[in-house]
Image (tube, rainbow, N blue to C red):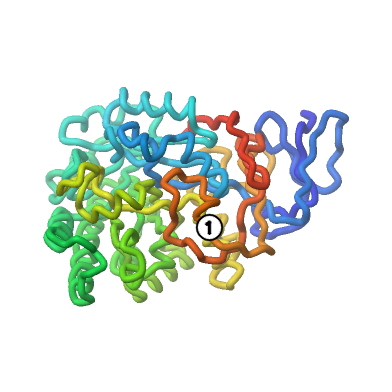
Amino acid sequence: MTQALLIVQNAQVLLPSGEIEPREVAISDGKITAVGTKLDLSPNTRTIDGQGLTLLPGVIDPQVHFCDPELAHNENLFTESCACVRGGVTSFLEMANTLPLTTTQASLADKLAIAASQSLVNYGFFMGATPENLPDLQEANPTCGIQIIMGSADGLLSVNTAKTIEPIFATGSRLIAVHAEDQSRIMARRKLFEGEADPATHTTRTKVQDNATTNETALNATKLALSLSKKYQRRLHILHMATGDEAELLRHDKPSWVTAEVTPQHLLLDMNAYEKNGAIAQMNPSLKYPRDREILWQALLDGVIDFIATDHVPHTLEEKAQGYPHNLSGSLSDSLSDSLSGIPGVETALPLMLTQAQAGRCTIAQVSHWMSTAVARAYNIPNKGLIEPGYDADLVLVDLTTYRPVRREELQTKCGWSPFEGWTLTGWPVITLVGGQVVYDHGTIDTQVRGQALRFDG
């Protein structure tokens, strides 16, 4: 038996059964080698005192927007991965609609090289479909799947009709992830905001109209993707589901090969946030009313929605103050990739959801399943998402007894703000391990640790 180089002691460990019990976890060569009680210590074994805190599998965030070389003044993979480890995120999957777009093997290779040199956590990248690259989508490697933005005007494939999208579903077997949008929604948003200095000045009636438009077009886009997925039995994933209508559609018509995700902001924030925070108003998909949030919550609890993503986007408050749909130069834009939608979220997602668990909305085991185990299964990422021998030692030790507010000055994300600032949360990570290496320890980050490219089997 391989000698353990590191043992986590005195921790309450989330077991694959869903039970949380006192255990020790032995680690060697980046792998978990044993989970038990009173494990043998060799003379060279290091120990981590868990202090009675809770040990969970590291979070796998399946939707972020990190690696934007053209936006490096905001963030880069190093700064964003620092934010990850503070939030207990040990792996991420990045979307293709960054600057530049990830639509070729060369652009994918560029991002992998950047990640190898900068990222403190493990990484995977989507390829984006364009009218020109459809024949190459199945050959690019390694990639976690094909991304389509339904109705995109930002260079990724515009798919408002079955004729446009069907060739993707009809060819190959790689997972297809769709951002359920529609060109009419993009243009409707532009008409609403064009000429408005401040999105928060819109009347309640205008917001209701915009919300109805986004719900209808998102539902139409999801229906189209779902129908083609069923026709070809093609693996489909629906990104950041935000409407109750889509969740109810899947509740009654969801093949076993279809999965969906939701973000904490769409579970916990509502349209009233428009009045309180103009930056939150610039989200895509936009925030919804309590009816949608309750339906999304129930769909998550019932397994209709499979897991949680952050859709982390690191625009600064100064940039977002320009207002949707302006781009970074201040001019109007139809582009989703350079408009200022999105919010930062990797540092707060796990504490937000664990706070909900402590409040009785769900269980700790469910949170871990939604943020680790289910993601690994959906994307066929081997040896991730559980604490058991043979699995990678991507772990996070969280404190479920202490409540602390989200403070801007403590954030690692370079954009330096959070829509949850001032919220009092529990479950903050105390120690984060990536591949058996301690990368975050009581507020200190080991910037020499590097993650690895994720594997996607099958």
Q: Position of residue 378 (x, y in %)?
A: 45, 47
Residue 251 falls in image quadrant? bottom left
Q: Position of residue 130 (x, y in %)?
A: 20, 36
Q: Nearer the viewer, residue 16 or 360?
A: 360
Left or right, 406 with respect to 171, comes to right
- Res. 420 in view: yes
Q: Amino acid at mark 1?
A: Arg
Left or right, 344 with respect to 60, comes to left
Please tell me which residue is depicted at 28% across the width and 35% down the height of the picture. Answer: 99
Q: Position of residue 167 (x, y in %)?
A: 18, 39
- Res. 457 in view: no
| Residue receiving disc 1 | 407
Quadrant of the snapshot with the N terminus: top right
- Report crowding for label 1: few under 14, some 14 to 19, many 20 or more residues within 10 A (C-alpha): some
Please tell me which residue is depicted at 57% across the width and 47% down the height of the picture. Answer: 86
Q: Nearer the viewer, residue 293 or 429?
A: 429
Q: Nearer the viewer, residue 291 or 86?
A: 86
Q: Secondary structure at mark 1?
A: loop
Q: Nearer the viewer, residue 108 or 86?
A: 86
Please tell me which residue is depicted at 23% across the width and 59% down the height of the picture. Answer: 223
Across the whole image, how many numbered discs are drawn on residues? 1
Quadrant of the snapshot with the C terminus: top left
Please tell me which residue is depicted at 20% across the width and 67% down the height of the picture. Answer: 210
Q: Position of residue 56 (x, y in %)?
A: 64, 51
